[in-house]
Image (spheres, grey):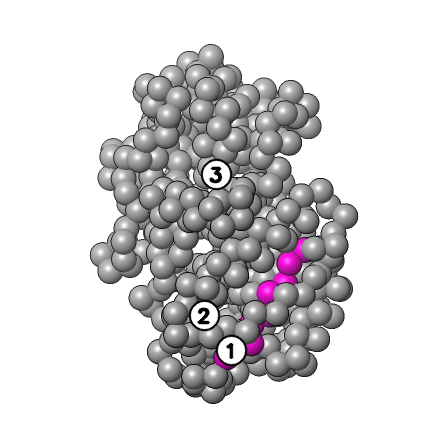
Amino acid sequence: MFAVFTAARKATLAAVALVSLTILTACEMPSTSGGPTIAPGDPVPVALLVPRGSATPGDAVLAQSLENAARMAVSDLGNVTVDLRVYDTAGNAATAAAVASQAVNDGARIILGPVYAEAANAVGNAVKGAGVNVLAFSNNPTIAGGNVFILGPTFDNTANRLAAFAASQGKGNIVAVHGTDLAGSLGRNAIQGAAGRTSASLAGSVPYELSQQGVIAAVPQVRDTVANSGADSIFLTSTTAGALPLFTQLLPEAGLSPSEVQYIGLTRWDIPPQTLELPGVQGGWFALPDPVKSNQFRTRYQSAYGGNPHPIGGLAYDGIAAIGALVGAGQSNALTGAALTQSAGFQGVGGIFRLRADGSNERGLAVATIQNKQVVVIDPAPSSFSGAGF
């Protein structure tokens, strides 16, 4: 694997996409009608499932951050009262399913969490008979659908945003470079789909094995594919903790200068901050949540809890914010699938987002580049979904 990236890998482990190693089956076909009724004006019992008790390094910190963010959101709801009840999953699918069933027996009308895809799938199956919806922190679209909605940022959403922007800048003839693992395959599919949904086009795709030798072997294939197709952009699925540093070093050395061929990243290029020092990422494009709103949340969290939130901790705030907005309308059907997927969406810690009928989500993202080792927003995040290109 990428032994030379060990330091970066450790620094960014918490921010790696939470995609399961196996493709899971969503618990049923997408539906937007199901869900429990609530008594308007009464406290709404919400179960928060966190990976506390897990043996995986970092899960204890993640669990606390999710709980902290959820409690912050509850305190911001004004006249809506949420009865937040926290359940520990130990990062285990069977445990998650068991505590989810317990939560429903305890009166929970909606479940927020868990984190990992396998656990979220198990929870969805465990509570679907009770008609309870699940807002999971996963970003794995293979588990979305039925009563399971994912809150994590998806490859499809990011690819759509970047492909549309690239096309608008005359850089829409794209070569996708992707790993052969599940995340890489999903990333490739997202780029291919984005090309079909926007005015961008996919000139070709180049896979690579997850090793230094695999990256080295892929570089001449990328060069030849760009030359033969006339592509003007290279869309990389690799992460800063994986192959990205090596690709951004070797591709320019192979004659693919970033000044002539636009480099685009499906993942965040600003995490960890030392990535910004790499020569090869200068001028590259990537997407990120609204930086102004993200910084506001981070500042508030630091003030309340004395440290930074986990990179995905804000998803718990988003979930509570959505629940609160719906319950605040005073309708008994506030937590049904139809209500959760209302088209206007919600305001979260990173900007606007909305849930889709297929269980996935759309987020309003900014497009950024790296200039002089600094992140610079070149296309701001939209403030609403009307006219936002979604």
Q: Are marks 1 and 2 in contact (CB under 8 Å)?
A: yes
Taking the image as shown, residue 119 lies to the left or right of residue 362, namely right
Q: Residues within 10 Å of mark 1 (few under 14, many from 20)?
A: many
Residue designated by label 1: 44
Give the residue at x 71% y 61%.
89
Instruction: Specify whether residue 50 is painted magenta.
Output: yes
Three-letter amino acid code at the position of disc 3: Thr
Q: Secondary structure at mark 2?
A: helix
Three-letter amino acid code at the position of disc 1: Val
Give the residue at x 31% y 66%.
344
Task: Check the image and report above or below for 281 versus 175.
Answer: above
- In front: 79, or 378? 79
Q: Residues within 10 Å of mark 2 (few under 14, many from 20)?
A: many
Residue 179, image x, y percentages = 58, 36
Of the image marks 2 and 3, the number of the one nearer the N terminus: 3
Q: Secondary structure at mark 1?
A: strand
Residue designated by label 2: 323
- Select label 2 or label 3 by which is in front: 2
Q: What residue span does the magenta drawing correspond to?
A: 43-51
Q: CA distance from mark 3 to mark 1?
A: 36 Å
Taking the image as shown, residue 113 lies to the left or right of residue 223, namely right
Taking the image as shown, residue 7 lies to the left or right of residue 69, namely right
Task: Check the image and report above or below for 254 versus 161.
Answer: above
Give the residue at x 39% y 83%.
331
